[in-house]
Image: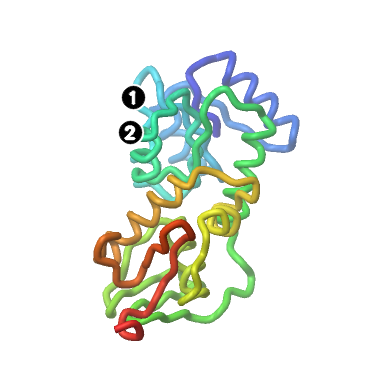
């Protein structure tokens, strides 16, 4: 679904994405996007922020309440604070206008690869008091369930599989975000910060997620490093 109020951009993006094999539902207003998704869920939503009837960030919140559909924000706003706020609100990715259809197509394919479910998921992974089940996509901390977004889950799973190893931000972007061409380190920082809060820690006082300055981050067993 392409949610864009500018008719020329909406039509161009719809034509371009259709030409490379996508089935596109174009809408011009936030309320129409919510109604369309509620009646027939889609695989990916491309969301403009400056909509005439409601803010794109509000649309994102409603979509998140309705389901876990990947949302790519397409915006002219390139302020770092806006980007961080949107990622915090649950956006999976963002592109700053202007961008090409090829760029958007690559981002769509990346989020679809990331959100596809493997047929033979590996066994439960445990580090310290964290227990993660990739089959049910459930995580518990000291027996209590953790509510994680899709990206938070994938990030935690990737780090738990490499517990004790320092993982660089480019590696996280390539393997978790499926962006081998690189991306914004700030994207990783935001999701690590969000994950830390849910694990009950901070960057200043880490327990599981330890930053290695100038290199990356590693997940450790707090009991093992005491």
Residue displayed at 65% across by 20% down: 12
Q: Quadrant of the N terminus?
A: top right
Q: Quadrant of residue 42?
A: top right
Percent of width and height locating residue 15: 69, 24
Percent of width and height locating residue 70: 50, 46
Residue displayed at 33% across by 74% down: 140
- Relative side of 195 to 179, left or right: left
Q: Which residue is mark 1?
A: 54
- Relative side of 209 to 41, left or right: left
* Foreground pick, 59 / 113: 113
Q: Which residue is mark 2?
A: 58
Q: How is the image coloured?
A: rainbow
Residue displayed at 51% across by 25% down: 27
Q: Quadrant of residue 62?
A: top left
* Foreground pick, 13 / 216: 216
- Is mark 1 in CB contact (under 8 Å) with mark 2? yes
The answer to whether 98 is drawn above or below residue 152 in the figure is above
* Foreground pick, 153 / 79: 79
The answer to whether 67 is drawn above or below residue 118 in the figure is above
Q: Secondary structure at mark 2?
A: helix
Percent of width and height locating residue 18: 70, 31
Q: Quadrant of the C terminus?
A: bottom left
Q: CA distance from mark 1 to mark 2?
A: 7 Å
Callout 1 crowding tier (Cα within 10 Å): few <14, some 14–19, many ≥20 = few
Q: Quadrant of residue 202?
A: bottom left
């Amino acid at each position: 679904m392409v949610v864009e109020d500018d008719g020329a951009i909406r039509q161009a993006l719809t034509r371009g994405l259709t030409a490379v094999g996508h089935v596109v539902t174009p809408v011009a207003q936030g309320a129409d996007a919510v109604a369309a998704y509620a009646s027939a869920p889609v695989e990916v939503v491309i969301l403009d922020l400056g909509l005439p009837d409601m803010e794109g960030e509000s649309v994102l919140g409603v979509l998140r309440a309705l389901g876990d559909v990947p949302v790519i924000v397409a915006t002219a706003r390139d302020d770092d604070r806006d980007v961080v706020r949107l990622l915090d609100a649950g956006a999976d990715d963002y592109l700053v206008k202007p961008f090409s259809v090829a760029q958007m197509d690559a981002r769509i394919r990346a989020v679809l690869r990331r959100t596809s479910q493997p047929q033979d998921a590996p066994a439960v992974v445990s580090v310290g008091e964290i227990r993660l089940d990739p089959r049910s996509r459930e995580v518990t901390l000291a027996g209590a369930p953790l509510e994680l977004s899709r990206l938070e889950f994938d990030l935690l799973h990737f780090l738990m599989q490499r517990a004790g190893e320092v993982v660089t931000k480019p590696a996280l972007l390539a393997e978790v975000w499926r962006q081998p061409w690189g991306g914004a380190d700030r994207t990783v920082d935001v999701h690590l910060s969000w994950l830390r809060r849910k694990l009950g820690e901070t960057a200043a006082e880490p327990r599981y997620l330890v930053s290695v300055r100038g290199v990356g981050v590693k997940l450790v067993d707090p009991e093992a490093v005491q």
